[in-house]
Amino acid sequence: MRYLKIDNGTGKYSIDGATWVSIDKINRDDLYKLLELAISSDDFEMDVYDKDMMANPSHQIIYSNIYKKFEDLTANRRRFVDESELLYKSAIEKYSLINHTEE
């Protein structure tokens, strides 16, 4: 599903694939939701950044930064998930040992 697009010279994003919001309205919670979708979804799609397709300079800056970060993330998604799971696993093991020694 496509989550970032360039439409009529405007950068837009969607969390649900149906409602599109101007990229300059994006907030921290929406970025977090997009991050979760990019990590968990095999079909996370974005329109390729092209500054010539966007008239608004703020849209160019915001879209290009988000696009670059999510492009890197989706390209390295499997490695990121594996590293996160490994980090989480070692934390669980560490705290499980602490709890067992306290009993």
Image (spheres, rainbow, N blue to C red):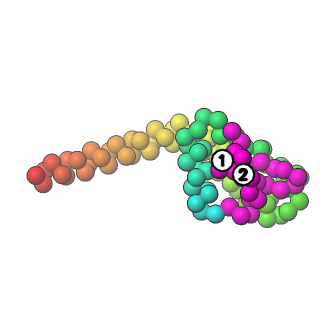
Res. 5 visible in picture: yes
Circle number at residue 16: 1
For residue 19, which numbered disc appears in the image?
2
Q: Residue at x 25, y 51 (%)?
A: 95
- Front residue of this view, candidates 100 and 34: 34
Q: Does the magenta stretch include residue 56?
A: no
Do residues under tags 1 and 2 come within 8 Å of each other at their CB atoms? yes
Instruction: Residue at 78% x, 44% y: name it.
Output: 48
User: Which quadrant of the view contains residue 25?
Assistant: bottom right
| Most distant residue in the left direction | 103
Q: Give the range drawn in magenta.
A: 1-26
Q: Could you tell whether 16 is left or right of 5 in the image?
A: left
Q: Tell me if I can see residue 67 in this picture.
A: no
> How far apart are the alpha carbons under marks 1 and 2?
6 Å
Q: Quadrant of residue 76?
A: top right
Look at label 2 and name its amino acid: Thr
Pick the front one: 100 or 2: 2
- Residue 55 rendering spot, x and y as whole percentages: 89, 59
Callout 1: few (<14), some (14-19), or many (20+) C-alpha neighbours within 10 Å? few
Which residue appears at 58% of the width and 52% of the height?
33
Is 75 on the left or on the right of 96, as rendered? right
Q: Residue at x 55, y 43 (%)?
A: 39
Residue 86 on image: x %, y % = 39, 41
Quarter of the image with the N terminus is top right
Foreground residue among 97 and 15: 15
Secondary structure type for disc 2 = loop
Q: Is disc 2 surrounded by few (<14), some (14 to 19) or many (20+) residues within 10 Å?
A: few
> Looking at the picture, which amino acid does disc 1 mark?
Asp
